[in-house]
Image (spheres, rainbow, N blue to C red):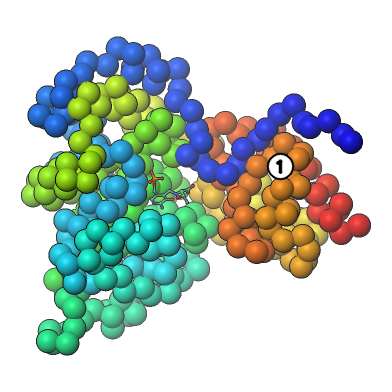
Amino acid sequence: MTNPPDFTIDLRSDTLTQPTEAMREAMARAEVGDDVYGEDPTVNALETLAAERLGKAAALFVPSGTLGNLISVLVHCGRGDEMILGADAHIFYYEQGGAAAFGGVQPRTLPNEVDGTLDLAHVEAAIREDNDHYPVTRLLALENTHNRCGGRVLGMDYMDAAAELAHARGLRLHVDGARIWNAAVALGVSPARLLAGADSVSACLSKGLSAPVGSVVAGDADFVRRARRLRKALGGGMRQAGVIAAAGIVALEEMVERLADDHANARRLAEGLAALDGVRIASSTVQTNLVYFDLTRPSPDAADFCAALERQGVRMGATSATSVRAVIHRHVSAADVERVLAIVAEALRAAAA
Ligand code: TLP
């Protein structure tokens, strides 16, 4: 029996990031009030800052990305309305069908292209005509960066074209921008510009930006007024939430630019993986901090492979029988990436032996 390793490099998600010292200090000194009365100055400051960064008139602090998406969809759609989104969208794939369960919203899924986009000709064809048989199509939802499509970035021209199509046909555009900060850094544009055509966005503070809790949703004043009512109805009114909003302010002010380091480490990981026998990855498609790769041999399956890595101190997530996700974040250094590559190479050798 070999001893368990005395380190863990945890690549399961960027949600694992811990608050920084600056966040903890800001949390300790945060001025607070009852946010359900709109009287928490720190929450108000975060919402003002987030609205500005996202280029919208107003923003609302919410406990999670899942709640941010749910609230946004329910503001835009009534019961029986239809939303168009990708079959690999987080909203469709990972949110327990919340919009259908709690809002009676029918998802109309289209296949995601490998780059995370939806073919706009398919979108156009999926928009319902006015007909008594049909539901009313109200919403197009995009995801940027796209998680299940490998953290791919939807570019500015595509975002603009999607917004133009949606608006020309009377639809709203919601963006699940859990990692919109990564998309903006990768493109070298502001999130506000990237989201210029979006009617709403849900953006996470607690992923690569390292805040302990929270997301923001942003849109026009009417959207945010209705979102605030829904947040309360869904149990998301949080009273002295300035204690956590304080960390969100630090996240927006100090933690966005450094995402470029995560992207560089992710690229290095992808290139190293591409050189290994038993792995398939199109490393040139790794644009941000998510690295998905496939195992090319039937055995072990991805879950067993991850279990073997974990015994060597590396944690990744199996996303299907053959595919694995590794997420780069603030607690993963360039040296850690090299260590991970050596451990993966060894696990593959051991599996092939
Ligand atoms: N994603 C999580 C898991 O749920 C898969 C992760 O580890 O990546 N939108 C996108 C695109 C997301 O990736 C996530 C979280 C969410 C929304 C939901 O955010 P939370 O976890 O704050 O509800």
Q: Secondary structure at mark 1?
A: helix
Q: Is residue 107 left or right of residue 334?
A: left
| Camera sees residue 218 | no
- Total marks in image: 1
* The residue positioned farthest toward the right in the image shown: 353
Q: Is residue 144 left or right of residue 274?
A: left
Task: Tell me the residue that label 1 is attached to.
Answer: 310
Q: Position of residue 277 (x, y in %)?
A: 80, 59
> Quadrant of the rendered structure where residue 207 is?
top left
What residue is at 16 percent from the left and 28 percent from the top?
35
> Quadrant of the rendered structure where residue 322 is?
bottom right
| Camera sees residue 326 | yes
Q: Nearer the viewer, residue 302 or 265?
A: 302
Q: Nearer the viewer, residue 48 or 206?
A: 206
What residue is at 77 percent from the left and 39 percent from the top?
312
Mark 1 and ligand 1: say if the CB distance to the nearest ligand atom is below 8 Å.
no
Task: Classify the position of the N terminus by image quarter.
Answer: top right
What residue is at 43 percent from the left and 74 percent from the top?
111
Q: Is residue 154 left or right of residue 52?
A: right
What residue is at 12 percent from the left and 45 percent from the top?
229
Q: Amino acid at mark 1?
A: Glu
**Mark 1 neighbour density, 10 Å: few (under 14) some (14–19) many (20 or more):** some
